[in-house]
Amino acid sequence: MAPIAVGDVLPDGTLSYFDADDKLQQVSLHSLAAGKKVIIFGVPGAFTPTCSLKHVPGFIEKAGELKSKGVDEIICISVNDPFVMKAWAKTYPENKDVKFLADGSATYTHALGLELNLGDKGLGTRSRRFALLVDDLKVKAANVESGGEFTVSSADDILKAL
């Protein structure tokens, strides 16, 4: 399947998270994105160095600026289970705006065409690093990294697209 691209309609899919009452929930991406301007960024794995030290912190730090430019939701997706995503989210106590959603079986990542086989590193199927700007389910920017790079999918890169 070809990777998601500018002009495509965001596919729907169901992801998991723990709510404020620590109850496991499932949410449809379309329910979060329909009629809204959203950023969806994906990372290869929770607690990994580039994801934890650069990618996620950039979106947390720039959330106010992104929201001032009309962004309604900022969503982080990783091919991890919801327990891992909950634990990872707690390492960012300053975070008020980034939602951490789990794609445990990589089903949604496959729907986006952004899966990455890291079996040779013992990590199985993961997500390529990416950032999408979506306006009412239509992709306006699709910044997808090659390999392990972090050159086009930062919060600053998405700010340039707004």
Image (cartoon, rainbow, N blue to C red):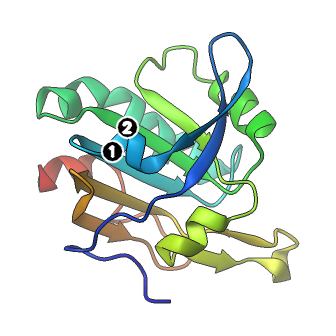
Q: Residue at x 75, y 28 (%)?
A: 87
Where residue 63 appears, as percent x and y from the top left, is: 30, 29
Q: Residue furthest right?
A: 122
Q: Amino acid at mark 1?
A: Ala
Taking 68 as reference, is 2 above or below it? below
Q: Residue at x 50, y 46 (%)?
A: 28
Taking 39 as reference, is 71 above or below it? above
Q: Are marks 1 and 2 in contact (CB under 8 Å)?
A: no
Where residue 120 appears, as percent x and y from the top left, is: 83, 83
Q: Nearer the viewer, mark 1 or mark 2?
A: 1
Q: Secondary structure at mark 2?
A: strand
Q: Is residue 59 visible from the viewing direction of this image?
A: yes
Q: Amino acid at mark 2?
A: Ile
Q: Residues within 10 Å of mark 2 (few under 14, many from 20)?
A: many
Q: Secondary structure at mark 1?
A: helix
Taking 147 as reference, is 123 above or below it? above
Q: Residue furthest top?
A: 21
Taking 30 as reference, is 145 above or below it? below
Q: Residue at x 50, y 32 (%)?
A: 99
Q: Which residue is mark 2?
A: 74
Q: CA distance from mark 1 to mark 2?
A: 10 Å
Where residue 77 appears, as percent x and y from the top left, is: 55, 50
Q: Is residue 48 left or right of residue 51?
A: right
Quarter location, residue 142? bottom left
**Precedes in sequence: disc 1 or disc 2:** 1
Q: Which residue is mark 1?
A: 33
Quarter location, residue 45? bottom right
